[in-house]
Every structure is written in C-alpha cells, then in structure tokens.
Amino acid sequence: MNISDTKATLSFSDGSPSVDMPIYKGTIGPDVIDIRKLYGQTGKFTYDPGFMSTASCNSSITYIDGDKGELLYRGYPIEQLAVNCDFLETCYLLLNGELPNAEQKAEFENTVTRHTMVHEQMNFFFRGFRRDAHPMSVLVGTVGALASFYHDSLDINDPKQREISAIRLIAKLPTLVAMAYKYSIGQPFMYPRNDLSYSANFMHMMFANPCEEYKVNDVLVRALDRILILHADHEQNASTSTVRLAGSSGANPFACIAAGIACLWGPAHGGANEAALTMLKEIGSVENIPAFIEKVKDKNSGVKLMGFGHRVYKNFDPRAKLMRETCHEVLNELGLQDDPLFKLAMELEKIALNDEYFVSRKLYPNVDFYSGIVQSALGIPVSLFTGIFAMARTIGWIAQWNEMIADPEQKIGRPRQLFVGSPVRDVPGIDKR
C-alpha cells in the first residue's frame, strides 16, 4: 500500500487541536484513512458497528466492487476463473498468488489427493453425535479435533508447517462433510479415491455405497466444482474476519477454521441458500406465487424474498449469472425441468427479473438462489448446504489466515466500545439491596 500526498484532517468544534491522519492508497478501490494514532492524540475512538467503514487489514487476495458487481481472486475476474479453471487451480491461486502451470498443477493435485483420508480414529468421534445432529455442528467439532491428530503442523511461525496445514484442511474437508452426511443417514463411510478429481471424489464419498459402483457424471461434477470456485473466497466477510480474529491470538489453523465454520453456520451468512430453498418449499406450487409476491410487497406481512439481492453487490452478483448457467445445465442433464420445485424456482426467477417492484429495487436472483437449486438437484440435502459452503470457503479462510500470520503489521484483534452502562458505584450490603 502507498501513502498518499493528501492527508485527512479531523477538526473539533470545541476548540481542541485538529489532527492530521495519513491516507493510504490500495491497488484499486477506496483509499483508507489511517486512524491508528487517533486515540493517542485525542483520547477518542471511532464508532463503527459491524466495522462497515473500517479496513481491518491490508490484503492482496480478493477484491469486491459491489457497485460494479465485480469479484476478483488475485486480480482475475471470477467469470474467467469459473470457466477456465477447476477448483484446485483456484485453490493454488488463492494460496500462492499465481495460477499454476501444468507441472505445478499436477504436483498440487497429487499432494491434495494424498491427504484426503482422515485419521481412522476420527470415525469414533462420529459415534458421539446424535444421528440427527446438524452437519455444521459435526463439522465444528471434527475440524477443531484435527488439531489433536496433526501435531506436526501446528507451529504457525513455520511457513512449511502452515503450508502442510493448508493442504490438510483443503483435502480433508470434503471427507469430513461426506462423513457427516453418511452418518446422518446411517450408511457406512466411503473412503476417498485417489483416481478421482477433487469434486468427483466428494460426489463418490457422498453417494456411493459398498453394494454398487457409483457412476461419476461429468456434468454434475463440473456443477459442484463451479459452486466451490464461486464460494472460495469473498474478502473480509463475517466468517473470514472470525478466522483472522481467532488467528490473531496465535490459535492453531484447525481451531481458526472451526471458528470460521461456527460463524458461517449463522442464517444471515452461510445459511442463505438453505433459506432460499426452504422458501420455495413453503410457496409450494406455481399457482401460489402471485399471493406470495403480494405478501413480499406488503411491508407489514413480514414475508421476505430469500435468495434475491445482496448486501454487497448493489447491481448484480457476478457469481449469479455463472450459477444460473450451471443450474440450467444440471436440470437439463437430470431431466428435472418439469419437477414442481424447479418449475416453481424458474417461474419465480422470471417474475423477479421482469416485475418493476423487484427490478427497481435491484432484487435480482443471487448466487444462493441458484446454488440451492443446483445442490438440491444433485441430491444434497438442505441441511448440508452450509457444509458445502464451508468446504468451498476453507481455501479462502486458510489463504487469509496465512496472509495474516505473515503480515508484520498483524496484531491481536481488540475492538473498542462505547460504554453506556452504569458509572462507578459502591456495592450496598445485602440488607440494602
């Protein structure tokens, strides 16, 4: 980051001396005002609930321009990566800063593939969970437990050990997600297969069983791969900030990723595609759409349109167009165009893209709307949607964590507060309370 010739001056109406603050310029995006010395010079903090106007770090990984509908991984537009690269190439890019050449790609794929098995004792962990436990609950526990098995890669100050931990997390998340699913339906765990690609291997672990051979469908594998690419990173969102905050204390990478999974579990974050599909099921059929739309337009009804619009993207979600293409490919491949749920989804999409109420408010279908439909078509249960999200986002979390650990400006996270409680008072005796 480069310091600007311009400074920001904070002046006070009570006659206190004004304060000059440096301004830094990023490669692209808004400049930032450096307020690190503000408290020392004025005795005052800034107030920014949700840190909506605060840059918590400098990063060279992901850039979002919500007004333009732009998402870049290491400078590459998501539209190009989703078409020209697979998920492991995207992982390599996020981790290392550049796309791999053919030799580097083969070596990276081989390394990840040979780390996909989890320690056999992990099987016993699952017996401690109820069969109806939410997969995210299972993932928080089992990912955190990985630290109990891999002591040889817990030194966060050793770049080589950080790299090994990154590989282990990327490789083992699909195995743990598939195990959580198999456990919930009472089927035996399926071991990973080294002859399959990352996404094909996950589909195999999810849907194969010892009784018959699972046939890998390339269209469905490609669809899953695209879901993973589109969700791999999203700048300093809530779960990524959680991973960075946990990591700032020096916690091991498995604990940090478990913290990220816990944050992602929240319905306002990773649960959006689950909420979108639940909404479709509640609408029930195409005939019920007009009544539902009327409720959405009525502010007093409390009915919300899930899977439409985005808090960051103000015009359109660049991932949604790509996911829409994948959605239609999958529905055609599986012959599901006439399935009531998917017909309902496509009709709702059509209305939202043409109805003036939604168009004027920019309530376009977002990536969660389409990815929920795709995952449902693939046979993935709604309760596992956020688990798939966690599997995809693990690479973003670990790349951001790795960048933070190597950053010389990194400090333990310690937000401030505006205290509005009682001033100092004496404790009365129990007879006077």
Image (spheres, grey):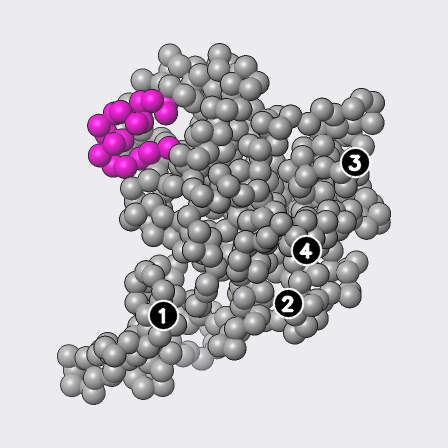
Depth check, mark 1 against mark 4: the one in front is: 4
Q: Which residues are magenta?
A: 348-365
Please tell me in which quadrant of the rendered image residue 99 appears: bottom right
Looking at the rendering, which quadrant does residue 191 occupy? top right
Q: Residue 189: which numbered mark, if any? A: 3
The numbered disc on residue 167 is 4
Instruction: Evaluate if marks 4 and 3 touch, with contact meaning CB atoms under 8 Å apart.
Output: no
The numbered mark, 1 or 4, whose residue comes first in the sequence reads 4
Q: Residue at 49% of width from left, 29% of height from top?
A: 326
Q: Quadrant of the N terminus?
A: bottom left
**Relative depth, front residue between 47 and 82:** 82
Q: Earlier in the sequence, mark 2 or mark 3?
A: 3
Q: Please report whichever mark, 1 or 2, sits nearer to the chain's N-terminal start.
A: 2
Location of mark 1 (residue): 418
Q: Which residue is mark 2?
A: 251
Q: Earlier in the sequence, mark 4 or mark 3?
A: 4
Amino acid type, label 2: Ala
Disc 1 residue type (three-letter): Leu
Label 2 environment density (alpha carbons within 10 Å; few <14, some 14–19, many ≥20): some
Q: Position of residue 174 (x, y in %)?
A: 67, 43
Say which of 53 and 171 sits in front: 171
Distance from the alpha carbon under mark 1 to that under mark 4: 41 Å
Give the structural element (helix, strand or loop) at label 3. Answer: loop
Question: x, y percentage for residue 383?
Answer: 59, 34
Q: Residue 333 placed where, x, y %?
A: 55, 19
- Dot 1: what SS? loop
Amino acid type assigned to the residue bearing label 4 in the image: Ile
Report x, y in % for residue 306: 40, 33
Name the element at disc 2: loop
